[in-house]
Amino acid sequence: MKNSIALLLLLAVTIRGFPNTSDKNDVEDDTSTQQLAVEDDDGNLVPLDLDAKDTNDTELSSESLNDSVLFYLYTVKNPNDFQQLWINDSKTLSESNFDPSKPTRIVTHGWKNSYKGESCVLIREAYLKHRQYNVIVVDWSKISVNLYTVAMSGVKKVAAQVGQMIDFLATQGVDTTTTIVIGHSLGAHVAGIAARQAKSTVDYVVALDPALPLFAFAEPGDRVAKGDANFVQVIHTNLGRLGFDRAIGDVDFFPNGGGIQPGCGVNWSCSHGRSYKYFAESINSNIGFVGIECENFILYKLDKCRDNNKEIMGGPNPTTKATKKYYLDTNESSPYAKG
């Protein structure tokens, strides 16, 4: 009894660090502060200003999109040096190391990042460590380096380009029902919208802590959501701050409750980034990230859900078709998985 009371007190203190997501207006107002920041490719914290205006009147035409949304292929034959692919360019594709008989993974980054960023590199390297994959990294950094408001407004246009690439690959023999699209932060919305817009059915979308700012009221089709692909898995690691404030996928995983991550303290950008670190590790983990179905984090920590269904978060070929919410604990440093 004393242990339960102590745990409840600890959880109460911990949850004070989580946002109150009962009112969407509160969430939107809370994320409109200057406290939000994300890391760029060099690890520098960049403030997220939701009130900044684009003084350059940035316009994304079809022509500029072709030069601003780039597709880089990596395989076991070229794990470090990309081969650039182009939409509807079958000659370039046939001359590359792309193998339509191998599973394809499409990976994209978030705001202020690029194909060189940690999210893309860790996931790419994890996939190619032991297995044969076509890993296509989407680089939309010419757009994502702009003000957050500009990058956010370009998400659907970037997603349309990715959707066109998916459809082109389908004409070249790719089985899109085995294709997985993975994205972090703003890139999670790119991944979901791209899969939804593609004429070819995409098997799986993995959304890594989808960006919340300016997306709180967005409807499916304007953000990642269940229905974007055959199945949508969401991994929450900065709940209600930089990351989405509620379950929005077919299955939603909440490591450590989905809010402040162990080892990150009050650094929300660190917690935001744990989503892709957990996923990258899950690809080659021997024990995996095992989540337990539970209504909320308090019941999970009180061990009230121990007999409920268990599912693996992430993995090289996510196959779970379970729905609802799953909770799990991680270590505070790598290796993060606790089985």
Image: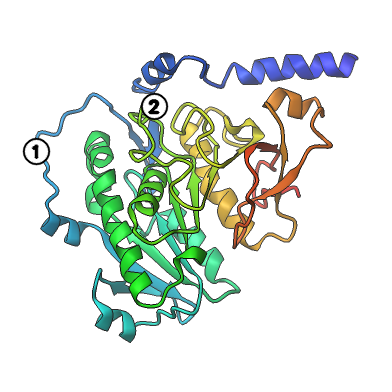
Colouring used for the render: rainbow
Please report the residue visible at 14 percent of the width from the left and 34 percent of the height from the top: 54
Q: How many marks?
A: 2
Residue 151, position as x, y percentages in the image: 26, 41
What secondary structure is marked by label 2?
loop
Residue 240, position as x, y percentages in the image: 48, 26
Judging depth in this view, the residue of 334 and 274 nearest the camera is 274
Q: Which of the numbered marks, if any, corresponds to residue 216? A: 2
Q: In this view, which residue lies farthest toward the bottom?
A: 95
Please report the residue visible at 71 percent of the width from the left and 39 percent of the height from the top: 329
Q: For this view, does 269 lie left or right of residue 301?
A: left
Please report the residue visible at 24 percent of the width from the left and 38 percent of the height from the top: 153
- Mark pair 1, 2: CA separation: 25 Å
Residue 133, position as x, y percentages in the image: 50, 73
Mark sitting earlier along the chain (1/2): 1
Amino acid type of disc 2? Ala
Q: Residues within 10 Å of mark 1 (few under 14, many from 20)?
A: few
What secondary structure is marked by label 1?
loop
Q: Residues within 10 Å of mark 2 (few under 14, many from 20)?
A: some
**Which quarter of the figure has residue 118?**
bottom left
Judging depth in this view, the residue of 285 and 23 nearest the camera is 23
Q: Nearer the viewer, mark 1 or mark 2?
A: 2
Q: Disc 1 marks which residue?
A: 57
Q: For this view, does 281 lie left or right of residue 159?
A: right
**Which quarter of the figure has residue 7?**
top right
**Which quarter of the figure has residue 292?**
top right
Task: Tell me whether the residue at label 1 lies in contact with that at label 2, contact meaning CB atoms closer than 8 angstroms.
Answer: no
Residue 196, position as x, y percentages in the image: 38, 50
Name the quarter where the N terminus is drawn: top right
Q: Which of the numbered marks, if any, corresponds to residue 135? A: none
Amino acid type of disc 1? Asp
